[in-house]
Amino acid sequence: MRNAIRFVSLATAAALAIAATTASADGTFFKNRRPADATAAAAQPTAQPPPAPQPQHAPAPVEQTEPAPAPEPDQTAQSTPQPEPQRVSGRIDGVVTTSTFVVAGQQLELMGVAGEPSPYVEALKGWLAQNGNEMRCDPSGAKYRCFTSKGVDVGGVVIFNGAGKADADAPPEYQNAQAQARAQHKGVWRQ
């Protein structure tokens, strides 16, 4: 047999608590009692039989059932929303692949670019050094679109030089740059 506790609703629990604290010794509730001056007169003996005992309101029985599984984090209205990515600007601290950079201490992934490892990484590091070795990266979903300090689109340069390929979320200009790199047999398109 499964052992778990089923909880009553908050409204039911509050009603039971109020009923339990307002019941008098004879089982009636304060709202049904007479005013104070009538209470003193009623305290004198009379020939009337005492009132029939009122049924006591016992709390609802607590059933034991299995606890419900915890909701998935993205299905609950109380889950904490993830903060939106913010613009990142600063010095280029590292180049992991031709689509992954460390800028101002944060690792960022280029939007629209499927990056490549060495030897393309080394060539890209040299080009970035010649162009100020700093980037401004604007969020685009979970990834970033990055520009050099001179305003040159890094993702476009990577794809145009065949140091990476346009992926599924690439903007049209990246698709065009890839077509040119392929036609000119640059980088990954050499054959």
Image (cartoon, rainbow, N blue to C red):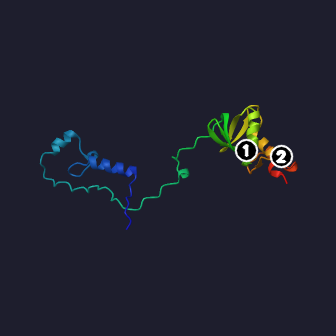
Assign the N terminus to one quadrant of the image.
bottom left
**Residue 136 image offset from top left, x and y in percent:** 70, 34
Q: What residue is disc 2 on?
A: 176
Foreground residue among 178 and 17? 178
Q: Residue at x 53, y 48 (%)?
A: 77
Amino acid type assigned to the residue bearing label 1 in the image: Val
Q: Earlier in the sequence, mark 1 or mark 2?
A: 1
Q: Could you say whether the residue bearing mark 2 is in a helix, strand or loop? A: helix
Foreground residue among 23 and 121? 121
Farthest residue to the bottom: give it: 1
Q: Residue at x 62, y 37 (%)?
A: 105
Foreground residue among 1 and 62? 1
Foreground residue among 21 and 112? 112
Residue 81 against residue 48 in the figure, above or below: above
Farthest residue to the right: give it: 183
Q: What residue is disc 1 on?
A: 121
